[in-house]
Image: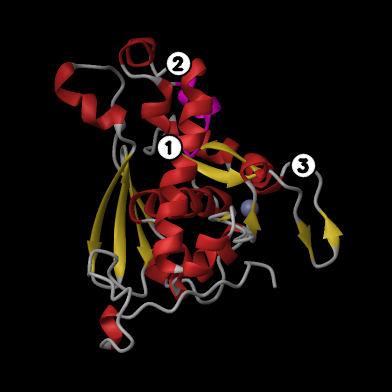
Amino acid sequence: MNMIDLPDLKAKLWHQMRHDLKSLVPWFADNDLLLCPACCRPLRFDEFSLEHIIPQQALACDPLDVRDAVPRNERSGMTLMCRKPLVIKGRKIPGHGCNSWKGKFYDASLRDLIRADFQRKQLNSRHQIALFSAGYLALFRQFGYQIALLPSGLLMRNQFFHPNSFLRDVPLSCQVVLAGERLRSYEEGNREYWSEPFKITVDGASAFIVLRNMVLNLPLSRDPKLPLARALPYAPSKYAFRPDLRTAFE
Ligand SMILES: [Zn+2]
């Protein structure tokens, strides 16, 4: 995909995400708004921009043969995030919303991780929370708004706005990163390593996210692969879905 295709990609993601959101929260059928997956504010199309989950500055560190063989958007994982300035506890945050927040607090750490030699690299909590937040966006990208609107989604959205230390409610098992040696060149047999950055396995109350040579665990209040009761007046609790629409900082 080249740069000319990006406006089309934004519109495509917008329609996909609106379709998903309307199926969970019918109120959105009567307007033209979408929730930002991080701050959860309902916003208009022009208040969103494309987000490379693995930032472009990290992808620029990929070996030349990889950059030639696999397009950048394929290596990054794309979603939409807001660009409307954030106001947290009455204070206007400079920059363009959650897009700038991720850029400011997490993108340099993600670049560090992508090119790290884990035999020598010491991880700090910012690295871990950067990976946790990228993992949350990857989970959202795969399973949609039910991820964002579950209690576990509220916890992960809250964590996104606390870049310096893990919140008390984040399980210890989700504060660990396992890492192996990274690949350093492109071959036909390893295309999958470079192309789709996130491989996700759901196991009951948690999700395992593989990002290239790293693995982390994220909390889940329900298995997003289970069917959802969208129209029934009553459904057993494991099929029910009660969206939590609180923004991360209220
Ligand atoms: Zn936002």
Q: Quick check: 157 left or right of 180?
A: right
The label nearer to you, 2 versus 3, is 2
Tag 1 residue? 120
Q: Is residue 116 visible?
A: no
Q: Position of residue 80 (x, y in %)?
A: 53, 43
Tell whether position 162 is magenta.
no
Rendered image: mark on residue 63? none
The amino acid on which the numbered mark 2 sits, given as a three-letter code, is Asn
- Disc with the residue nearer the chain's start (2 vs 1): 2
Mark 2 to mark 3: distance in Å? 26 Å
Q: Position of residue 67 (x, y in %)?
A: 38, 15
Tell whether position 55 is magenta.
yes
The residue shown at (80%, 51%) is 93
The residue shown at (32%, 76%) is 231
Q: For numbered disc 1, what is the local secondary structure? A: loop
Observer-nearest residue: 212 or 25? 25
Q: Residues within 10 Å of mark 2 (few under 14, many from 20)?
A: few
Q: Residues within 10 Å of mark 3 (few under 14, many from 20)?
A: some
The amino acid on which the numbered mark 3 sits, given as a three-letter code, is Gly
Q: Position of residue 183 (x, y in %)?
A: 28, 26
Residues marked 1 and 3 touching at CB (< 8 Å): no
Tag 2 residue? 2
Range drawn in magenta: 52-61
Q: Residue furthest front?
A: 30
Observer-nearest residue: 34 or 149? 34
Q: For numbered disc 2, what is the local secondary structure? A: loop
Tag 3 residue? 95
Mark 1 to mark 3: distance in Å? 34 Å
The amino acid on which the numbered mark 1 sits, given as a three-letter code, is Arg
Q: Position of residue 250 (x, y in %)?
A: 70, 73
- Disc with the residue nearer the chain's start (1 vs 3): 3
